[in-house]
Amino acid sequence: MKTIVIRFPLTANDFQKVVRILQAGGLVAVPTETVYGLAANALDPKALQKIFEVKGRPQDNPLIVHVGDRWAVRKLVSEIPESAKLLMKKYWPGPLTIVFKKSPKIPDSVSAGLPTIAIRMPRHSLIRRLSQAAGFPLAAPSANVSGRPSSTTPEDILEDLDGKIDCVIDAGGSYYGIESTVIDVSGKIPILLRPGNISIEQLRATLGKVRIARGNSLRPKSPGMKYRHYAPKAKLIVIEGRKENITKKIQSMLNRGRGKKIGVLTVQHPRAYRHDCVKFIGATNNLIARYLFRALREMDRKGIELILAEGIPEKRSGHAIMNRLRKAAGYNVIKV
Ligand code: TXA
Ligand code: MG
């Protein structure tokens, strides 16, 4: 299959072309404000099956359904609890996914057999307009091969999926750079399943009590929690602790590791280490989130064998960043 690349903003003709691809059951990589999504008709089991195939995604990991407007939610769920109404009012459109009890009409493959469905109304208007014009909600996992860092640029998508999907819409780098916050409101007490840009502090301010799902439990609340995720090809070690200790530890590891191709991800400045492969990914949480996955993929393209990454404080979106970084490292963490 030839994968076509279309530049954002789309001409009216291109927009219609993409709508037709989706209506025919095709797969289109679409920008959202978090990461790129691999979109298909959420009500078409054959299209959904293709998503699982091209990503190599485990069948028991359910997909997020993206809607064009709030009204579309009614048809997908069996009830909208008060907590969900508050969240939808405050954070939609935006980087928040809400897990509801699902309507019986939803294909099983969307929710991987679970009695719930994850729904998001993104801020990026293109995916919303495509859903409205096509006439159905769009299932869209991140547009990467399962297990790899999520795609935040068109190059990332092509690296993983060229020739396997119908179309990529090129809108440059993603704004947030990490995936949406996922919160489950289908039970009595809301549960944070995946941290994201909308933080636990914000969710508690809106809802009161919110539990945090434990990432490594044997029976994960969210199937996505049990798989290796966001992983670069290189070995990745996260060094956490006080800033001075982190710097010292990484510099000593660099000194000892001569001869090996080592890359460093720093949040300090490009010359924080005496070493030739140091990537400064930003000094604020917003920038670190935006460039984290890109930097991991860049290290792989350079043939780096070992990546050393600095840990950051887990305040607000720092929680989400550290969640991604630790998972990417397979929980290979050194505390100093
Ligand atoms: O920002 C995002 O959320 C991006 C963009 C494209 O919207 N999408 C994304 O999708 O990150 P994906 O498939 O890579 O991650 C979906 C996560 C997985 O961890 C999955 O297990 C969880 O959401 N999930 C989906 N449906 C669920 C459900 N019914 N109950 C619990 N977790 C669910
Ligand atoms: Mg993903």
Image (cartoon, rainbow, N blue to C red):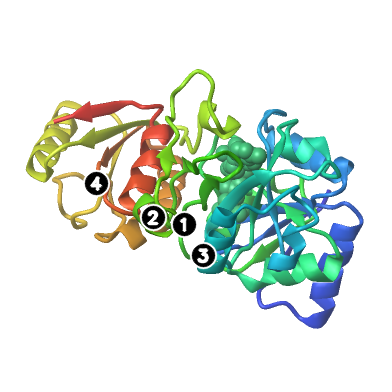
Q: Few, some or many C-alpha atoms within 10 Å of disc 1 (few <14, some 14-19, many ≥20)?
A: many
**Depth check: 188 or 223 in front?**
188
Q: Secondary structure at mark 4?
A: loop
Closer mark to the observer between disc 3 and disc 2: 3
Query: Is 25 left or right of 51, judged from the image as shown?
Result: right
Instruction: Please tell me which residue is depicted at 72% across the width and 29% down the height of the picture.
Output: 59
The mark nearer the N terminus, 1 or 3, is 3
**Amino acid of disc 2:** Ala
**Depth check: 111 or 293 in front?**
111
Query: Is 280 left or right of 177, judged from the image as shown?
Result: left
Direction right: furthest residue: 24
The mark nearer the N terminus, 3 or 2, is 3
Q: Which residue is mark 3?
A: 91
Label pair 1/2, CB-CB below 8 angstroms? yes
Instruction: Please tell me which residue is depicted at 36% across the width and 34% down the height of the picture.
Output: 326
- The numbered dot on residue 177 is 1
Q: Which residue is mark 2?
A: 289
